[in-house]
Image (cartoon, rainbow, N blue to C red):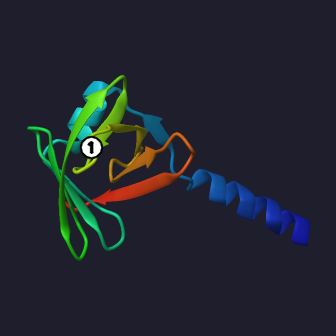
Amino acid sequence: MLRLITIFMFIASMSSAETWQKLSNEGIEAALSDKTLKYGYPIQKFFADGRTIYETQIVTHGEWRAENNQYCSVWPPAVTWVCYDVEANSEGTKVRFIAKNGTIDVGDYTD
């Protein structure tokens, strides 16, 4: 009986699992331009002109762009652009950024 319950729980969790789709340059621009994402407490605003603002206890200004089907950003005083793969969930409520080392940051739309 316990085995049967475990199987049903596994099937139920699979059906409710989020699915993610990797975004192209156009998808990244559509997903981020003039949007705001919340990462727990911090929020990040993306402007269509390539500016971005990251707000925690302080406000940090940077730039972003879509390049080679990745989100790329630079945060002065740094001059090196860092790029991430971007995926959107099937519900259209979240975006996640995947770093080269596999680290994942998930943002929820606030608007």
Residue drawn at 48 percent across, 42 percent down: 20
- Residue located beneath label 1 in the image: 74
Q: Amino acid at mark 1?
A: Val
Rendering quarter of residue 27: top left
Rendered-image quadrant of the N terminus: bottom right
Q: What residue is at 16 percent from the left and 41 percent from the top?
A: 33
x%, y% of residue 57?
23, 77
* Image location of residue 25, percent across then percent down: 30, 26
Furthest residue in direction bottom, as rendered: 57
Indicate the quadrant containing the C terminus: top left, top right, bottom left or bottom right. Answer: bottom left
Q: Is residue 92 above or below residue 59?
A: above
Query: Which is nearer the eye, 78 or 18?
Result: 78
Q: Is residue 33 found left or right of 106 in the rendered image?
A: left
Would residue 11 be seen by someone viewing this image from the given angle?
A: yes
Quarter of image, res 63: top left
Point out the residue furthest to the top here.
68
25 on left or right of 89 = left
Residue at left 42%, top 40%? 87
Q: Residues within 10 Å of mark 1 (few under 14, many from 20)?
A: some
Q: Position of residue 48 (x, y in %)?
A: 11, 39
Q: Is residue 71 above or below residue 18?
A: above
Which image quadrant is residue 13 in? bottom right
111 relative to 86 in the view: left or right: left
Q: Nearer the viewer, residue 59 or 16?
A: 59
Residue 36 against residue 65 in the figure, above or below: below
- SS for callout 1: strand
**Residue 1 at least partly seen:** no
